[in-house]
Image (cartoon, rainbow, N blue to C red):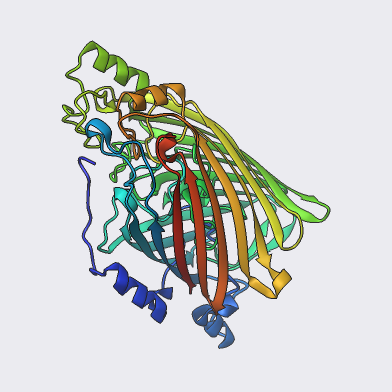
Amino acid sequence: MKKKHKTQFTPNYTQHQWLAICLSGFSCLSAPCHAENLTALQSPSEFSLLGGLSGLGLHNLQDEWWNAYGQATYIYTFKNGFPAAYTNLNGSNSSLTTDPERGFTATVTVYVGLKAWQGAEFYAAPEMISELPLSGLKGLGGSIQNFELQKNGAENSTWYLSRAIYRQTIPFGGTTSELKSGPMQLAGTVSSRRFVFTAGTFSILDYFDRNTYAADLRRQFVNMAFLTNAAYDFAADARGYTFGFVGEFYYDDWVFRFARIAGPKDPNDLPLNFNIFEHYGDQIEIEHKHTIKNQPGAIRLLGYRNRERSGRFSDAMAAYQADPSKSAANCTSYNYESSNANAPDLCWVRKPNIKMGIGINMEQALTDDIGLFLRGMYSDGETEVYSYVPADRSFSFGTSIKGERWGRDKDSVGIAYGQSWISDQHVAYLNKGGVDGFIGDGKINYQPEQVVDIYYQWHVFTSTWLSLDYQHISNPAFNADRGPVDMYNGRVHFEF
């Protein structure tokens, strides 16, 4: 991408050095990122720091005034070669390479929480990533094979502050329950009726579109199709983080959430536009928790509305038709570096535009060890992808099973299916050789993109999990002239 912003890299570890560090146990000083379930770490008694301090009487795991957690995750990916009628046709540059490829991500995160005055808490989460994406992170739409991948990452390690927030809780009565200690959560008690205000830097997926069985992708599915709704173009920088505020009103089994957050200055870029009164992402979510035959479940309805300086597909095609010099190859402002002189480009028509979408998110436990999930979202499909993946509609469902039935209660296995669509305008733009975000083969024989993801997570020893993950992706980048392609992932995950 043009105008790509980089940060300083320290230290300068390669993928093999990071794997060695992870296997030695050093990288247990870290924690979650993106949409994973931030309170999903196992019982603190399993971890040496808080558990050990608690045993010495130096820390209260039931009523904390501070805590610290971490995780480290290494994901190795291998892609088979696959058939394609064409690749990067006419100077387009966003096809998935047909040759076999290898890639990886390594992440380390530390979460620190501190209690202040009554109901007030502060949290910070420094994070590191090192990555080598397949095909330069191009050629897949709603089914990117590794959710950890970032749009501006490099093989050298990069440190940054993923989260820095202030949280204020105001109780309104109801019943009282215990909050367990976890990353970004101090142990204590909480009222079933309360208002929680959060402001700072965070991932919006820490709060919206959560799901017990498909969100904690460091210990569940690996494909990004199961991180959230693929059509949820939530405002965020190139790493998946944003700045803004979230309000949550809890009333027993109901939760109402709203948020206003900042998007990037340019699509899929790193610098944020902090003028959230002019350019912003708004979202609301209504959640209801229930029980069916004594098993928990939840239904969530989510809507979002972005106002950002983006390009409409119809405007880009009209501009090129009126003046063929306004092609992708001639663009001098922010675009995706396509050299196709016969294709339209969104760079010519970016202006303040509105993008909207609505979705549903359901989860249901069938037994104590088997759960189901389902998500679906419809976005308007008139403007380019701005912060997430280039899917305009999406649907996914699957199941996760704990290993209790075969005597491995901390193991799990899952299988899921995801499908993404794009709008007619989006198809027409791509068929003329346009590029949008990660996709643009030069032309397109449109079909929905589909993925099947199967994983097994093995609890190796305390605080360490090893996973094998297989993915079959059909119609990569919504193009039936290419694929299918098979992906194989190995994942090692540590918690501290």
**How many labels sit on residues?**
0
Task: Please tell me in which quadrant of the rendered image residue 213 appears.
Answer: bottom right
Q: Residue at x 62, y 55 (%)?
A: 212
In the rendered view, would you say 438 is above or below 115? Answer: above
Residue 21 in the image: state x and y as whole percent: 35, 77
Residue 129 in the image: state x and y as whole percent: 34, 61
Whether residue 114 is visible: yes
In the rendered view, would you say 308 is above or below 47? Answer: above
Residue 182 in the image: state x and y as whole percent: 55, 66
Query: Of residues 219 and 94, which is closer to you in this image?
Result: 94
**Extreme residue toward the right, this view:** 293
In the rendered view, would you say 386 is above or below 246? Answer: above
Q: Residue at x 38, y 78 (%)?
A: 26
Task: Please tell me in which quadrant of the rendered image residue 247 appears.
Answer: top right
Residue 88 in the image: state x and y as whole percent: 27, 37
Q: Residue at x 35, y 77 (%)?
A: 20
Whether residue 174 is visible: no
